[in-house]
Image (spheres, rainbow, N blue to C red):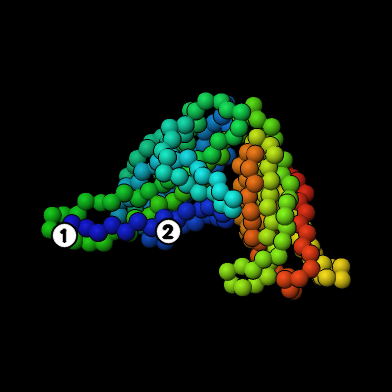
Amino acid sequence: MFRRILTSLAVLTGLFAVSAVIAMTVQPVVVDLKMVGREASAPIRVENNGPTPLPVEVRIVETEFTADSVGASDRVSEDVVAFPPQAIIPPGETQVFRLQYLGEQSEKSRHYYAEVSQLPVELPEGQSAIQILYNFQVMVNVASALASPPALTIENPAIVQNAEGKNVIAFTVKNTGTNYGYLSTGRVTFIHRDASGRETLRRVLSSNDIQQMIGFGLIGPETSRRFVSPIEVESAGGVAEVQFAAGRGR
């Protein structure tokens, strides 16, 4: 008998590299594929940091885009497959899983999560224990050669209060392209002017700054996504502006 505790280490809005101190490390946390050719496959690496063999399973699910986030659904997909689907990783060793897109060509990019899950270990009869199992989510984005490039624009900048009660700048990013885009492939400028029109803030975030402070900022094909930035302003009054300068895209 054992009790299982499942700890999900999902990489959603921030998409930072994450590791479980006890069990395993998964790299990378974002995979960019294409629907055909050499770039239709890519590896992910799972390292066993623990002192015992680590049983791991990779499952592919579809994503769900909402107004302010991207998350994993419960819909299993066979468009992307993992080779091998399961493995037992010896202590201190690394297992390479290859993700391969096998779905049809589409006029829009497609998006999935590869859920890398630690499997429970059968204990000897009569022994009781708590097992903490880790579940990493690797975002898998598949660009289409039939789709138009991402075209990102900023809409509806506003001053809002964050969870800590601080005045920060929020904004919406709209993608009119049929391929996905990343906010972090460009440069974002935040401006605040008070009621008299005086500029009280001007802050430019580079691609690296955006990744560190906001995340990769995935915006799906023909979708919009709302972001609440960590950029603080003096007061809730006045006007906020957000400008985006595009960089490279898929």
Q: Which is more toward the observer, 149 or 64?
A: 64
Q: Quadrant of residue 213?
A: bottom right
Q: What is the total number of numbered labels drawn onto the structure image?
A: 2
Q: Which is more toward the observer, 122 or 224?
A: 224
Label 2: element kind: loop
Viewer can see residue 224: yes
Q: Which is more toward the observer, 87 or 144?
A: 144
The answer to whether residue 111 is left or right of residue 120 is right
Label 1: element kind: loop
Residue at screen point 73% across, 51% down: 155
Q: Is residue 38 above or below residue 91?
A: above
Task: Report the amino acid beneath label 2.
Answer: Ala
CA neighbours of label 2 inside 10 A, class few (<14), some (14 to 19), many (20+): some
The answer to whether residue 184 is left or right of residue 87 is right
The quadrant in which the N terminus is found is bottom left
Q: Is residue 158 above or below residue 77?
A: below
On the image, the x and y values in percent for residue 136 come to 44, 51
Q: Residue furthest left?
A: 126
On the image, the x and y values in percent for residue 65 come to 55, 45
Mark 2 and mark 1 in contact (Cβ < 8 Å)? no
CA neighbours of label 1 inside 10 A, class few (<14), some (14 to 19), many (20+): few
On the image, the x and y values in percent for residue 122 come to 21, 51
Viewer can see residue 145: no
Q: Which residue is mark 1?
A: 127
Point out which mark residue 20 bears.
2
Residue at screen point 69% across, 32% down: 148
Task: Report the amino acid beneath label 1.
Answer: Gln
The quadrant in which the C terminus is found is top right
The answer to whether residue 128 is left or right of residue 172 is left
Q: Quadrant of residue 61?
A: top left
Q: Quadrant of residue 36?
A: top right
Q: CA distance from mark 1 to mark 2?
A: 25 Å
